[in-house]
Amino acid sequence: MKTLAVASQKGGSGKSTITIHLAVAAQQAGMDVIIADLDPHSQTAAEWAFERPFDKPSVVSSDAEDIEALQKQASDEGFDLLILDCPPYVDDVVMMATRISDFTLIPAQPRFADIKTLPRVIESVAEPYAVVLNACTPGPHGMETAKTLEVRRVLEAGGIPVAPLHITRREAFADALMGGEAVNEFDPEGKASHEVKTLWKWLRENW
């Protein structure tokens, strides 16, 4: 079984949204997936599961004391992938979650507030990890705008691993969640779905 942590220092980075859409992409790729919602205050993944008309992927609420036991239980029960949706701050939960994970994904919007908090996240995150630029302004023909490209170059110049793709700010991501779906189900042939599938493919090749 593989374990993926999705972590950030700042609320609104799209952490839970990416978790949900990746989980469904993995499920559609043939994996049996379970999400552990570790945020005690805003349980987006758990609330999404409540609205969902399907029982997969599985979603459970958990806390720091249960993470390792949950990982073992998920493995024993035959799950292929455990995704840890971490709280939007760096604490012992995040440090433990990234330590027991095979890979950590750090969503960050290409904006000043998000980029300034990244060093605090990275100091506490176990390798391997990568930043994925999220909620980016749409560029022509799916390309990165000058602003997104500039942020990518700054991060890479600082030695921070960055996924070679970005997630664009699209209404489909939020619209899908409202009905208990992911974009891969809501609009399977749309641009948002393509971006999620591309991110999932890159993750599978790099952990």
Image: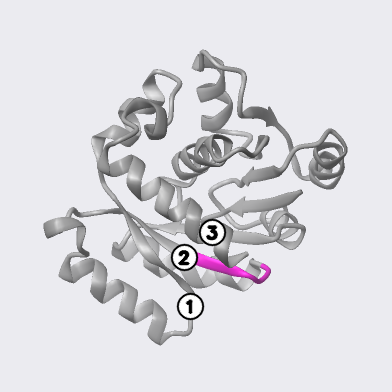
> 191 above or below 158?
above
**Residue 143 locus on image (x, y percent):** 20, 63
Callouts 3 and 1 close, C-beta under 8 Å:
no
- Where is 3 relative to 99, above or below? above
> Which tag, 3 or 1, sits closer to the chain's start?
1
Mark nearer the viewer, 3 or 2? 3
> Residue 36: where, in percent of width, then height?
67, 37
Disc 2 target residue: 131
Are the residues flagged by discs 1 and 2 in contact, CB closer than 8 Å?
Answer: yes
State the quadrant of the C terminus.
bottom right
Seen as rendered, the residue at the extreme front is 30
- Residue for badge 3: 203
Depth check, front residue: 151 or 101: 101
Residue annotated with mark 1: 160
Q: Does the rendering let one see residue 55?
A: yes
The span shown in magenta is 126-130
Neighbours of disc 2 within 10 Å: few (<14), some (14-19), many (20+): many
Image-quadrant location for residue 205: bottom right
The span from disc 1 to disc 2 (Cα, nearest Å) is: 8 Å
Residue 13 visible, this angle: no
Give SS at disc 2: strand
Count of numbered marks: 3
* Residue located at (71% from left, 54% from top): 97
**Residue at horizontal 34%, vertical 59%?**
166
Question: Mark 2 is on which residue type?
Answer: Val
Residue 127 placement, left or right of 162: right
Relative to 35, does residue 102 appear above or below in the rendering?
below
Provide residue 57's location: percent of width, then percent of height. 61, 29
Q: Is residue 3 left or right of residue 72?
A: left
**Main SS class of the magenta portion in the image:** loop
